[in-house]
Image (spheres, rainbow, N blue to C red):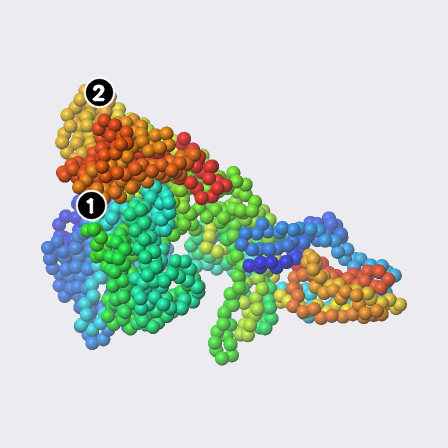
Amino acid sequence: MSHRFRAWLVVALLLVTGPVGGAETVAAGALRLAVDPAGAITASAAGDPRLLRSAALHVYDGATKAAVALTPTGVKRAGEAVEAGYRGAAGLTIALSLRPMGRCVVWAITCRNGGPAERRLEVGPTLRLTRARVEHYCDGWDEFDAPASERSSTKLEGNFPLPGVWNKAAAVAVGLEPSALVSYLRHDYRPAGDDAWLAAVTRLAVRPGESVTVPFVTCAAPGEWGWYELLEAYYDSFPSWFVARDDVDPRATAGSAQYRAWPAGPWSREISRRLYGGWEWCYAPFRRTGDIVGRAELWDYQPVRPFGAPRGKPREEYLAWRRHAFAQGERGAGVAMMFYIPSQVWCEQRLATERYPDALTTDPKAKILFDTPWVTGHDDELRVFPYQTSFGEATYRDLGEVAEQLDLSGFAFDTAGDAVRYLGPALGKLDCRAWDDQVGVYCAESVAIARLMDYVHTLRKDGRTLAVVSNPMANGTYASCFRSDSAMLERNPWSHTRTESDRLRWKMGHKTLVWWEGYEVNDFIDPAHIRPEQLAGVYQGLADFTLLQSLRVGYIPTPNFTQGVARLVRWLPLIVECVRTGWQPVPAARVPPPLWSARYGRGLATILAVAHETGEPVDGEVAVENARLGDGAFLFSGHDGRAVSQRLAGGETRCALSVPVRTPVVLRAWLNVRPAAAVAAATVSAADGATAATLTAALTGRGETALTPRVPPGMRLDWARWNGAAVPLVPGEPPEVKITLAGAGRLECRFVSRTLKLTDEQLFDYPFVAAGAPGCAIVLEAADPESLRPTALSLQEYFRYWFGRAAQPAAEVLVPIVTSPSAAPRQVRLRLAAGASPTAALAGDDLVLEAGDAAALDDLVQALLRVLDRRYWTPDQFPGVAVREALARYDPEG
Amino acid sequence: MFHGVFVIMGRRPKPADREAGVGGRRSWQFARGEAGDNPQEVLVTRTLCWGLAALTLARTAIAAELSIAAEPPLPVANQVRNPGAENGRDLLPEDWSFTTARPDIYTTGWVDGGRSGKCLWAKCRTSEMSGYWSQSVPVTAGLKHRFSGWYRLASGRLMCYAHGRGTLPDGRTRTIDQRVYQGTMRGHWLAPVFLAPEALGGPDPALWYPFRIEVEVTEGFTSLTFSAGLYFQPGEVWFDDLFAGLARTTLLPVVKAGEGETLRRVVVRQAGVDKPLHDTRELPAGAREWHQRLADLPTDAVYEVEATLTDGRVVRQGYPTTEEARP
């Protein structure tokens, strides 16, 4: 633990204990609030007790344009919460509940309108700061050095809902609790004299007799990593909004197939699998925008522009085509098919006006009509509000219906990030309403989209929750991003600015993000004059930049970037592993400029990326702040097992790195050392095989220490040796090793696959195909052999692809699938055996793949294919012939 | 954008050239400006020697008279104040102001290095906001106006536009917003580490290029704002020699044969344009006078009338004829 971090924790502990002066206190993380009997709130942040001075409730009346004078009515403790009441004029009462949640304090503000007229209010917490202690401010989008004048931002579309300030010692923030749905959000930073005020406020339209509650948060954190400290505190406090749901199809957290499976082609399965395309953006699978089912009564109409294929087909023919297309993608290509909807905020013009007039969105500042080709291309489309309206009703019914008809894995929400104002007749039924002086009371579109996403998460397929993948853009609302299981940025890594992608990453937390678009090199070059080698250089440079940015901010590059580009396909497994492990806002790896660092995961799952974007190699030391990662200290090798030497001191693991040009250095945690002080220096390397792996750590230190190694996925720790002698494994998950260090020593750990009971050589040399012909047969051994056929097809397809597309000359090789022992010299036996653990083992010349059920056997085969990719590797083919060879060879690391 | 419009832009002799006496022999460079989506600007540059001193009469023996007038006369008045950005003080150009909603991402200046003397400069470090040098200029309703000038673009994307809101007698409002964009990938922030500069497309950052906007000014407008700046991309741009004024003129050429002479053919050309604006072909025998009204011609062009006498002799006249009239 660093001295700085330890000192910060001590201060935090001192501050969070005990009530002061009869006040009721509530503390969370580094924040402490105390409410005195008069309802006044004092506040402090550990790390810098002078930064944060007090807090207050902001209540403003939109009709009188004045702050509401509040009279306290009492303060009481309710369990771990503190509750305070206030009374305003004309029947308004405010109830405030302060409750710790993780590292945040949740402010549940309830406004009750006991008066006879609707109240237009503005409410939210306000923090009073010592102006001189504020060094930086972030309004949820932009970062500023201590603003000298007021900064106010109303970007509900865009802002992370947590404006914050910080200095080197501490950071504090105020904002919305993630579940809060609002139609208006303003972030204010207002310096005044020696003070500065930080506020997050929303506007509410409260009907007579109605109570409206909005949950806000305040939090405090260390200051070193500034804005990212606050993001970390927020993510830690509300993890379910920022990590992948475990009840959703895990393919939704991989990359996108990006139209390699929509529609499916002859090589879809392998291209998608090899390029980590887990889910597909099934674009506009309907004829008429707004009618996603394709109902008979809505089918025949006159489009503004001619129908294209296949939407011009007769209804039954079209619906059959659609069923086939979804089935081909799901079962043929193995991709989770996401049914595209424009977040149901667009509807074909006549359908909208004739059937759903109450749903029309009429925001005078918004684009509400597309009279140019948009969703389907042949329709003009009007903007609609899909919640508590006739169109909302139809939408909810339709989503359930197509999900069942097409056995969907989820929905793809396009145009998911907007918050235009709905002013229509359904307003009377809506909650989350706000007001402004231009249109009066309204409800933001983001409320309807969020509710639609919530509804999708109530739908099930095979016991799993349907997924929401979305396209919110960088300036999408927090509400959509927080509810998305994964999302695309419809940009490439260099669109607009280097850091546009960061804003979306903040809102997605640890969840999957993918780049969309592609290289679009014609934006850069003059196609008429560029030479092929120059063009290849442009692609290579953009691929390298994609690699760096993918690791910096955690995006998976999609097939438009990777297909045929050897460099990216080599790095893709690691990028995907990083993204699925979870981007961490605080890198906890100090590096000198121009180096930057990024972190994925914690503890032994930690992966660190270090790189720079200059034209010369950079030597520098990365200092990992161990306390951020877990107890003790962590030791690292290169991601590829390359030896890394490191020193441990002051709570840091310090590695000297030489970082090449356009190539990241990635470190993987391999050993956890407790206590950290036991080890002074180490050199760690790993040999990461397919069926077994070895960790070697040369350690220098003194004293008893417990060492916990990272166990590679799918493996178990087989044995450990200290200076050549076996040492006992202390059972645990993972097991640890206890040794006594007395100077230098050498630890070796051997890991073996839990499932692959054969050697790498046996696996890679297995003659699935020999001399251009099938060398085996795939035998289905189960009571219901057909239950294993999809798994067998994926194995068959693997070699059909390899010999038919990757190998030269191409040959059609179809390993036969049989349901009874064949005459083939070798057999790959897919076998179900009740209670059997998944295993792959040789039995004579046969390869036996066994599991207890079909799903487990399929998982085993998919894992096996990933392993076989080491032997049968290919980047596939780049679409552009002029640079195909150059990009297929582009692999500067050899 | 001005796709397919041939624009003639003369490069003015620098003051130093004049002092050296170079200006005595007029050598004009003409550029075909085609600022489209990705033009390698100025594809054709050629020297056209008008021999202005000799244009009034090819031979002193010829008595034929050529006269050219125009409505409005050329050159038309430039309504831009301080068009060459030569005047200013306290590091700011007179009559120009720079506006953006995000001044923190812009650096601007009144700097040396113009086409001649000073010029306007702007640099933006992010894509979050546009920013423009601008001034309001008077316009005449019912007439087409030209807003033009020269830019040098090191990186990013520029936008120049003429814009404003007018009010009709019944109180309704109308807007004008006519734009031209030009982007470049040269100087892109990915170069040179990730992209080789020589592989990138866009105008040469060392050269000046013309831009041009034509606006039909409708009822209700008495002025428009002329703005030139960077459009939502990090970049750097310079502007010089800006112009706002009437875009169209009507040319009124007259040719009269001298004593004993008759006219065979008259051709009117716009410099730099191959196809004649007007060609009489063979005139009726004995023709002694010819005149024509040629409407809707650009004001930023140079015209030539060429008369061929029956005996084969040729007389030419250029218009406008003074150096100051050159665009």
Farthest front residue in view: A823
Q: Quadrant of residue A688?
A: top left
> In this rendering, does residue A100 appear at all?
yes
Given residues A322 and A170, the one toward you in this image is A322
* Number of the label disc, if any, that sits on residue A12: 1
Farthest bottom residue in view: B170
The quarter in which the C terminus of chain A is drawn is top left
Residue name at image x 16 percent, y 24 percent = A727
Instruction: Name the amino acid, label 2.
Output: Asn
Chain letter of mark 1 equals A
Relative horizontal placement of residue A259, taking residue A120 as reference (left or right): right
SS type, badge 1: helix
The quarter in which the N terminus of chain A is drawn is top left
In this view, the mark in front (1 or 2): 2
Relative horizontal placement of residue A417, taking residue A714 as reference (left or right): right
Q: Looking at the picture, how far across and down is residue A353, in whole percent?
A: 35, 72
> In this rendering, does residue A673 appear at all?
no
Q: Quadrant of residue A622?
A: top left
Labels 1 and 2: the sequence-earlier one? 1
Q: In this rendering, is residue A144 above or below A94? A: above
Residue name at image x 76 percent, y 57 percent = B52
Q: Looking at the picture, how far across and down is residue A348, in whole percent?
A: 37, 66
Q: Looking at the picture, how far across and down is residue B127, in whole percent?
A: 44, 53
Q: Residues within 10 Å of mark 2 (few under 14, many from 20)?
A: few
Q: Residues within 10 Å of mark 1 (few under 14, many from 20)?
A: many
Instruction: Name the amino acid, label 1.
Output: Ala
Q: Looking at the picture, how far across and down is residue A462, in whole percent?
A: 20, 51
Relative horizontal placement of residue A491, taking residue A96 as reference (left or right): right
* Number of the label disc, if any, that sits on residue B310: none
Q: Which residue is mark 2?
A: A723
